[in-house]
Amino acid sequence: MRRILSRDLYATTAAALLVVTAVLVGRHVERTHHTLRVDWPPVLGSWGPHTGPGTPAALLVAAAAVAYGPAVAARLRWRALLVTAWAASSAWIWSLALVDGWHTGVAVRLTTRYEYLRVIDRFHDVPAALRDFTHHILLHSPGHWPAHVAGHPPGATLSFVLLDRIGLRGGGWAGAWCITVGATAGVAVLIAVRALATEQSARRAAPFLVLAPAAVWMGTSADAYFAAVAAWAVALLSLAVTGGSAWWAAASGLLFGLTCYLSYGLVLFAFLAATVLLLGRHRIRERPLLLVPLAAGLAVVPVVFTLAGFDWWEAYRLLVTRYYQGAGGIRPYSYWVWANLACAVLITGLPVAAGLARAGGVLSGRRRDALTRPGTLPAAAEARLALVVATALVSLLIADLSGMSKAESERIWLPFAMWLLPACAFLPRPRAWLAAQAVLALLVNHLLRTGW
């Protein structure tokens, strides 16, 4: 038992030191070389202690989640828990966003010169815009796309074009869409954890998914919306392979296809999909035809975009060139390859570091503590849950090593962060850990003026 607690302490101390080192080294590098291209490394933001309209609500949500979250998660009926988790996540994200006020915190976030709403008027003819999309990716091309439009497949931009077409115009509606949909990502993760591990593990993870520091960047960022789509793709696949439903398999394939056309980096969710298929291999052996609707659903979005004239591979090739034409070509890999991991700590929190250490212990066979302590997870469920979070961690590390996420990873890695949070199900004394989550999110949101 003492060894397990020591491992928690070592993991959280190492994570905290990583963040402090990234801040100190980053400030020195930016002061002397000006190559990091962020004002408060490793986060894209600036120092600016402040409070705002959302502060009282954020404090209230945090206090309620810490005090009652674990008990409520343990006692509510399952469907009621899912609805409550979504509502609480929404309240947490909205309150943190409104610390900066409605205009600054929500309405203008997706209307800056880098964002998707800047090009809505260039998509009056959607098929023509898709055929012409790759011609505007490079920085020096005529009418080049803003950074985020060029940096993502057109599915991302088309999402906001469709909102505009149905009358939900402007940054306020776009921000509300990202927050509302993004808050469902945690619900999807809970459904997947229940299907792949146990309901107990999902219930233990629920308060941490609600009170995640990632909420600081989920309101308002399009990556919150991307995180939700990717999470539901995994959740539906989990339901398909454990319940044998062809409809869930087809829906999952459809969302996986959409995920790849929202962000290039989210193709790494193929690893999580493979893990789900591995964990559900017995059901797949019984019903191998489940793979047919999955593959059919997966093909829909790529086929539609390809027939419309958009070449995903060519666009990605041009994006790599565009990336190095801009800040990506200046920001030093030698700093960001490890400082990005400090950003991962900031969006997931110190409890995830301890949870990942415990997950590593499970996968290496050291789970005597879990087997002897009352109220902890059964060994087989522990192993399945540990494999899921380990896969998410590996995906994040691959994204890091690729060099295509130098800075801004506190936003870019939101989809992966959601799958690290269930590692907190391994932790005892959840209220203390939840308090650490809440304090981190509140400090970051009130001390920094974040870029997203």
Image (tube, rainbow, N blue to C red):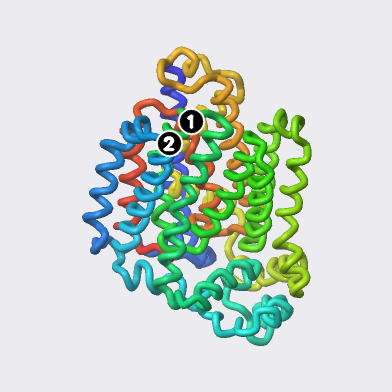
At a point 23% along the width and 49% down the height, the residue shown is 60
Q: Secondary structure at mark 1?
A: helix
Report x, y in % for residue 165. 53, 78
Q: Nearer the viewer, residue 363 or 328?
A: 363
Q: Is residue 71 left or right of residue 232?
A: left
Report x, y in % for residue 80. 38, 41
Q: Nearer the viewer, residue 338 or 7?
A: 7
- Considering every residue shown, the one lying at the far bottom of the view is 142
Report x, y in % for residue 74. 37, 30
Identified by mark 2, the residue type is Trp
At a point 53% along the width and 18% down the height, the residue shown is 367
Q: Is residue 326 left or right of residue 49?
A: right
At a point 72% along the width and 71% down the height, the residue shown is 318
Relative to 252, is 201 above or below?
A: above
Relative to 336, is 366 above or below?
A: above
The reply to whether residue 194 is visible in this rendering is yes
- Considering every residue shown, the one lying at the far left of the view is 56
Q: Nearer the viewer, residue 88 or 115?
A: 88
Tally the marks. 2
The alpha-carbon separation of the residues under discs 1 and 2 comes to: 8 Å
- Numbered tag placed on residue 78 in the rendering: 2
Identified by mark 1, the residue type is Glu
- Numbered tag placed on residue 401 in the rendering: none
Image quarter where the C terminus lies is: bottom left
Q: Earlier in the sequence, mark 1 or mark 2?
A: 2
Is the Cβ of the residue at disc 1 closer than 8 Å to that at disc 2? yes
Residue tagged 1? 199
